[in-house]
Amino acid sequence: MNAAVVTVGDELLAGQTTNTNATWLCERLDERGVAVERVTTVPDRVADIARVVNEYRAEYDAVVVTGGLGPTHDDVTMEGIAAALGRPLEEHEEALAWLGEDGYSRSELIEGTTKLPAGARALHNEAGVAPGAALEDVYVLPGVPTEMQAMFEAIAPAFSGTPTYREEVVADEPESALLDRLEEIRDRFDVSVGSYPGESVRIAIESTDEATAAEAAAWLRERVDTV
């Protein structure tokens, strides 16, 4: 299974808010064996949201969108999703009923809070008010991290794939000096290898087979100067 993550918000693009949601979602999806192949941030504009979601839902098994839910003027994500899927926005009675159980009356809710694309499954917001939505392998979650995380956990079983096992070797050599051994480990083992230089070089070794990842890491540790 592969996926794309779309985060929505002008404040993200302006650097006013750190995009922790994207990092958290990528980690959780990776843990479930899902390959995240795109992470994109778009502004609070209906056309941009619709264009990106429409493109990604044709390319990936799932699209996870976070941010821009609610009744304020810049909360336009649901409108963008509706435009991408060619559906109108409608008051969602089940979402209203859930909020009623939480102590909110219809008259207390601001107009637009419970409007979702027609045919969407409402996702209850256990940590806030604005509901999320699931429709045609597009999952729409709030932008508030605590709300987003709680809602994702409720739908996590929808995301599954082949687990990837990761081993790390830290080398006390320049990255350029390691090229021959990095090439050889790829030739010898069915693994993917990434190298990340800093004060030392972190070498990440990944495989869908746990024993292969461990064997490749052991082979490399014997052939590099480790920290």
Image (spheres, rainbow, N blue to C red):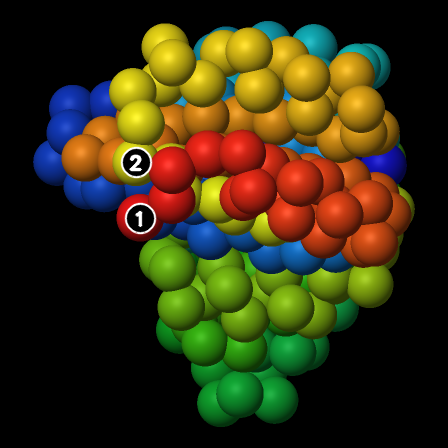
Q: Which mark is residue 157?
A: none
Q: Residues within 10 Å of mark 2 (few under 14, many from 20)?
A: some
Q: Residues within 10 Å of mark 1 (few under 14, many from 20)?
A: few
Q: Which mark is residue 227?
A: 1
Residue at the image position 59 percent from the left and 37 percent from the top = 220
Residue at the image position 65 percent from the left and 78 percent from the top = 98
Residues under numbered marks 1 and 2 in contact, where contact means CB atoms less than 8 Å apart: yes
**Residue under numbered circle 2:** 172
Task: Tell me, yes or no, if residue 85 can be seen here.
Answer: no
Left or right position of 54 against 119? left
Camera-side residue of 214 and 82: 214
Camera-side residue of 184 and 119: 184
- Looking at the rendered image, the quarter that the N terminus falls into is top right
Left or right position of 52 against 111? right
Residue at the image position 54 percent from the left and 34 percent from the top = 223
Task: Tell me, yes or no, if residue 94 can be seen here.
Answer: yes
Against 172, residue 111 (above or below) is: below
Against 45, residue 220 (above or below) is: below
**Residue 122, located in which quarter of the rendered image?**
bottom right
Q: What element does badge 1 sit on?
A: loop
**Residue 62, located in which quarter of the rendered image?**
top right
Residue that lies at the very extreme toward the left in this rendered image:
16
Q: What element does badge 2 sit on?
A: loop
Residue 30 position in % (x across, y down): 66, 47
Q: CA distance from mark 1 to mark 2?
A: 5 Å
Residue 86 position in % (x across, y down): 77, 19
Q: Of the residues under marks 1 and 2, which one precedes in the sequence?
A: 2
Camera-side residue of 226 and 154: 226
* Type of amino acid at the residue the image marks with label 2: Asp
